[in-house]
Amino acid sequence: MFIDIPGELEAALIDLPLPTWELDGSFLAASTMERYRTELAATPRFEEIAETLRHALIDEGGGYAVLRLGNLAKALGAGDRFRRLATGFAAEVAVPFSPFPRWLLWKDIGVKVDKDPGKSSGIGYNAFHMDLVNATLPPDYTTLLCVRPDPLGGGLSILSDAHAAVGRLSEASRALLTESAYHYGTFFDLHEVGEEYKPFPILDDSDLGEGFVRFTAKMLERSELGQAHAEAARELAEELVRGQVSFMLQAGDYLLVNQRRFLHGRQALHSGQETVPVCDRRLLLQLFLRARAGDGSAE
Ligand SMILES: O=C(O)CCC(=O)C(=O)O
Ligand SMILES: [Fe+2]
């Protein structure tokens, strides 16, 4: 679901004087959200675009959206003014927050040639996953703002409807996925995402098409799992790939993913990243969102 910004709205947003945001603990401050909302609501057709965005993320069959902010990025650069606008759009969906004390809201995802290639900021295939999978309360939304795509042309984003993939599995596999037999990764100094969840079930008792499918295909390679449980997880990974959509994020594209509906990942970057100067490499900015109580997507 790609959402274009009408020209009249772009023009108004380029001139909009959004102030620096403030934080309240790990969350965007309510006063900032109110201020942004007031300023944004006065621009032409903003409410309509915000409503389209919410529908794309929450409605039946939906679960992700790409807001095309490329013209705004071109006009404003990728600095604070542009980030404030993206933060304003995000706050229309849910409450922006940072689980990592090190990062104030937006976290850089650059390209590191010597990192585990399959992990965030690695150069390889980043397999289907949800972010913060091993937290009892993962972010309801994960969002990625593309500052620069891979100049060599790799790095397609991949998305897959998690509940649809689960629906294609056998009863027996689904039953295995409801058992607390899975674990992945470490958990250290994370805020507002609950406790470490270890071991965890991939599915809640009854997968009614809602709730998290707590899955990361990275566990298949990196966690010791029992054979039957690993096999069921592998089947889920295969179904996710079977149902995937892929597209290239362009500069200024803002991908928002409802983590209760869709899992995400990324194809490998193009070979030869070590020849690209660090300042020209692919760069995304990541921001997490917490659903507002009672908006239908919270538990
Ligand atoms: O690089 C990407 O496009 C996705 C990165 C990602 O999913 C992550 O870092 O959690
Ligand atoms: Fe991710």
Image (cartoon, grey):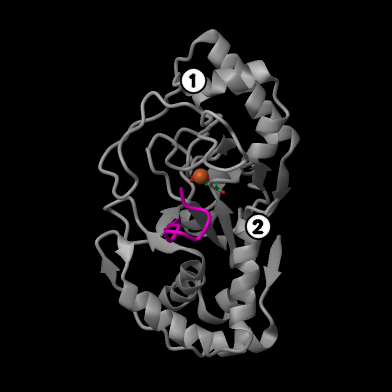
Magenta segment: 288-299
Residue 280 at x, y percent in the picture: 53, 58
Q: Is residue 286 above or below residue 79?
A: above
Residue appearing at x 27%, y 38% in the figure:
188
Q: Is residue 2 above or below residue 213?
A: below
Residue appearing at x 63%, y 52% in the figure:
63
Q: Count the marks.
A: 2
The residue under label 1 is which amino acid type?
Answer: Glu
CB within 8 Å, label 1 to label 2: no
Asked whether the viewer can see residue 203, the reply is: yes
Classify 10 Å Cα crowding around label 2: few (below 14), some (14-19), many (20 and above): few
Q: Is residue 3 above or below residue 240?
A: below
Mark carried by residue 179: 1
The residue under label 2 is which amino acid type?
Answer: Asp
- Disc 2 is placed on an element classified as loop
Please check the rendered image and state whether residue 127 is part of the magenta-colored stretch, yes or no.
Answer: no
Q: Which residue is mark 2?
A: 59
Going from the N terminus, do you reach mark 1 or mark 2 first?
2
Residue 231 at x, y percent in the picture: 61, 15
Q: Nearer the viewer, residue 5 or 277?
A: 5
Mark carried by residue 171: none
- Disc 1 is placed on an element classified as loop
Q: Is residue 229 above or below residue 187?
A: above
**Residue 11 quadrant:** bottom right
Q: CA distance from mark 1 to mark 2?
A: 29 Å
Please check the rendered image and state whether residue 298 is part of the magenta-colored stretch, yes or no.
Answer: yes
Asked whether the viewer can see residue 240, the reply is: no
